[in-house]
Image (tube, helix red, strand yellow):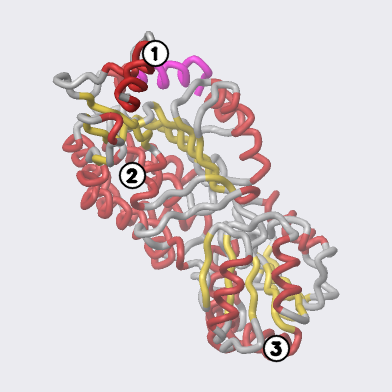
Amino acid sequence: MTEQEIKNIVETQRAYFRTGTTLPVCTRIQALMRLKKCIQAHEAEINAALKADLGKSSFESYMCETGLVLSEITYMLKHVRSLAREKTVATPLAQFHSRSYQKPSPYGVSLIMSPWNYPFLLTMDPLADAIAAGNTVVLKPSAYSPNTSRLIGRIVRKCFAPELVSVVTGGRAENTCLLKERFDYIFFTGSQTVGQEVMRQAAAHLTPMTLELGGKSPCIVDKTANLKLAARRIVFGKFLNCGQTCVAPDYIYCHKTVKEELVKEIKKQITRQFGTDPLASENYGKIINEKHFCRLLSLIDYDKVTAGGMTDITGQRIAPTVMENVTFSDAVMQEEIFGPVLPVLTYDSLDEAVRTINSRPHPLALYLFTRDKLTARKVMARCSFGGGCVNDTIIHLATSEMGFGGFGESGMGSYHGKDGFRTFSHYKSIVDKKLWLDLPMRYQPYRRVYDKLIHLFLR
């Protein structure tokens, strides 16, 4: 798509937004209903596209992508009227007689840039929030998941007029052209490196934005943890989507006294969940492309691999791999892994673990396995992270009742449910002053008012 075509899309959407067509809540509801029905009608095609791009099974595609999108749309359909309603707030006595209220208003023309690892979910989820808030939207899905991106384009064209929602496909050139345009809001999900560039470009127009990034999310396992259950849930969270999940446990940080037993249970769970030959499993995904595949191989120190390590070069697949005796100076600990490689590190005391985690960039997620409630309170209060779980992994993002997002190096802003509506809305603070009372003391000349007040209080 050319730079001029992109410019035309943005200008057309801006003109359409200014007509006020997106403002009525009933219009937003109709748009969301069309989207929901279209997704349901294309579920088999969505599964096929995700299988082609990432090797996902139909069950995983619904559980982690399609089903979550439908859940978000259902939440918005149920709550959009109340979310879009003006909220009256208290008025100071000095402004008597007035009504003060906050009015949620759409930003306008929004840009949503989505990644390849959950290409359907991370495109359609923020789209539902943006439509519910009354915006027009330009979608830019990833070029690395071409089958899903093409399908998203077809679904959007069936559901919406281009002046309401348009899809721009392509790669770096299209991204560059899009970021030159002035949008009213930008929502970006992806890597920290690209996020920094998006933020730099947005600064030229002072465009507000949300960044959903990633980071090295720790998984702490203390000496009181239920190790069998911990291993089961860690293996699920780490190797879901072949490890290509922004909130996957990046590494295990366990108490040194439980490391041997924990690793033993993790190995058992890998076999139980993926079989003796995970690369032969139809339900185990693949690495998105050769570049990412080679990057992951460069992070594996085979002298420290105690489970897995097998690769399928032709199919770009890496078996669930466990590395022991890892230190924070190893290559695998210098960047977000974003793949099926699980390093195991140990600590001597919980205070040491908390200090170490807080000395590193803020992660998008943190997980803790413990039976000790005091330990849970301590870690959740003292560690800095976006969101997480106690005695589980991943599941905190699978709800529309809580916002999802990071801060610092892992992003800014949040979405899902009410938070998603708020993300794509500006809340105008308005005072509606009545006409029948107009106190004179605020007007010039102030000396005359001051003299009257003095005379009143001193007579």
Residue 154, percent across and down?
A: 35, 38
- Residue to which mark 2 is pinned: 128
Pointer 1 with pointer 3, Cβ within 8 A: no
Give the structural element (helix, strand or loop) at label 1: helix
Give the structural element (helix, strand or loop) at label 2: helix
Quick one: 56 or 219, which is closer to the camera? 219
> Does the rendering let one see residue 275?
no
| Magenta part of the chain | 1-14
Give the CA distance from mark 2 to mark 3: 44 Å
**Which amino acid is tagged 1?**
Tyr
- Residue to which mark 1 is pinned: 446
Q: Which residue is drawn at 78% across and 81% down?
A: 348
Tell me if residue 9 is in the magenta stretch.
yes
**Which amino acid is tagged 3?**
Val
Q: In front: mark 1 or mark 3?
A: 1
Give the structural element (helix, strand or loop) at label 3: helix
On residue 258, the disc is: 3
Mark 2 or 1 closer to N-term? 2
